[in-house]
Image (cartoon, rainbow, N blue to C red):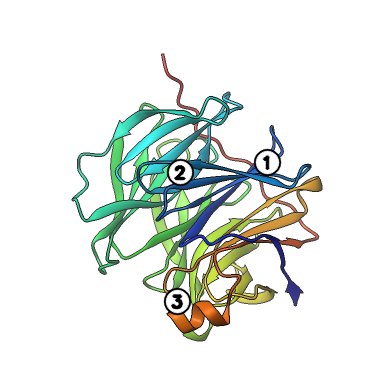
Amino acid sequence: MMKANLLHRCSDETGEAATWLPGLDILLWVDIDNGILHQYHPKSKRVKEHTFPEMISSIIPWKGHEHEIILTMKNRLVSYHLEKETYTTLLEMPCLHPQLRTNDCKASPEGRLWCGVMHISEHNGTASLYCVDNDLSLTPVLKQQCVPNGLVWNKTGNRMYYADSGRGCIEEYAYDSLTGAVYLLRTAVEVPPEFGVPDGMTIDADGLLWVAHWGGFGVYIWNPVTGELLDKIDVPVPNVASCTFGGVNRRQLFITTALSGLSASEREAYPLSGSLFVADVSTIAAGENHYPFTTG
């Protein structure tokens, strides 16, 4: 069993969307509730905070835009320039009910954007997984979900793994990169309740799933072929929300955590909740996915 070390102490209500930008060698992550984008520079060990007037749920690298990224806000996609600190709305999502918001969003290997949308109160059956094509067309693909979370694709791009935290499982889908169609194959991982629930995740070069477990005190490493739990990275806080490979030779795992969901006594018992952690690992990510949309 591995252990994560504290990298940056902060008090994120919901620290999410850990994202490594290899072109800039920086780590980004968000505090959803407080509308904060964190920017960590490993060389200087400094953290810069970008604040927004509304919640931010995810970060998507933007192909061909080194200093610009795509962010999901409550019901829209925006482009954000890290140096100029300006943002522009790319897509409004008028189909969203006022009680719905975006959650985890990821780009697939060929460049489609997959965006989870959930009820603010996490009501079961009210969430959906949407696909945003590179022409910004929006299509609901999976309906009657609960809390759409981790999304990853294997190296060949023909399998998609998707975690619905509300159902406590990770599903495997056949993925057609030409059309964006998905076909449910099976439940790849059933997470026992004592391990918490699967939240954000990443996939390594060997096809193993590295899954942040909300309520599970760690990142769990699952074999999606057998459903077997292979290892765990211990994190000294209950609610572990996301993880990503990065750092020197991409052999570090950055891990975000959350204060959200903890009682006053739990916040006192786990004072590092909401902080950023890191663990040295012996593997690397399967690859980098970017959104290819270009303006003009």
Q: Residue at x 62, y 76 (%)?
A: 228
Earlier residue among tags 3 and 2: 2
In the rendered view of the protein, which quadrant contains the C terminus?
A: top left
Q: Amino acid at mark 2?
A: Asp
Question: Seen in the image, is 58 located left or right of residue 271?
Answer: left
Q: Amino acid at mark 1?
A: Ile
Q: Look at discs 3 and 1 and give the one toward the viewer.
A: 3
- x, y (%) of residue 75? 29, 43
Q: Quadrant of residue 260?
A: bottom left
In the rendered view of the protein, which quadrant contains the N terminus?
A: bottom right
Residue 232 visible here? yes
Q: Amino acid at mark 3?
A: Leu
Q: Look at discs 3 and 2 and give the one toward the viewer.
A: 3
- x, y (%) of residue 90? 36, 29
Q: Pointer 3: residues within 10 angstroms few (<14), some, or many (20+)?
A: some
- x, y (%) of residue 290? 55, 35
Q: Which residue is mark 1?
A: 26
- Secondary structure under tag 1 reads strand
Q: Residue at x 42, y 48 (%)?
A: 35
Q: Residue at x 29, y 41 (%)?
A: 139
Q: Is residue 114 above or below residue 62?
A: below
Q: Pointer 1: residues within 10 angstroms few (<14), some, or many (20+)?
A: some
Q: Is residue 199 above or below residue 60?
A: below
Q: Which residue is mark 3?
A: 262
Say if mark 3 contacts mark 2, CB within 8 Å.
no
Question: Seen in the image, is 192 located left or right of residue 55?
Answer: right
Q: Which residue is mark 2?
A: 176
Question: Seen in the image, is 203 located left or right of residue 80?
Answer: right
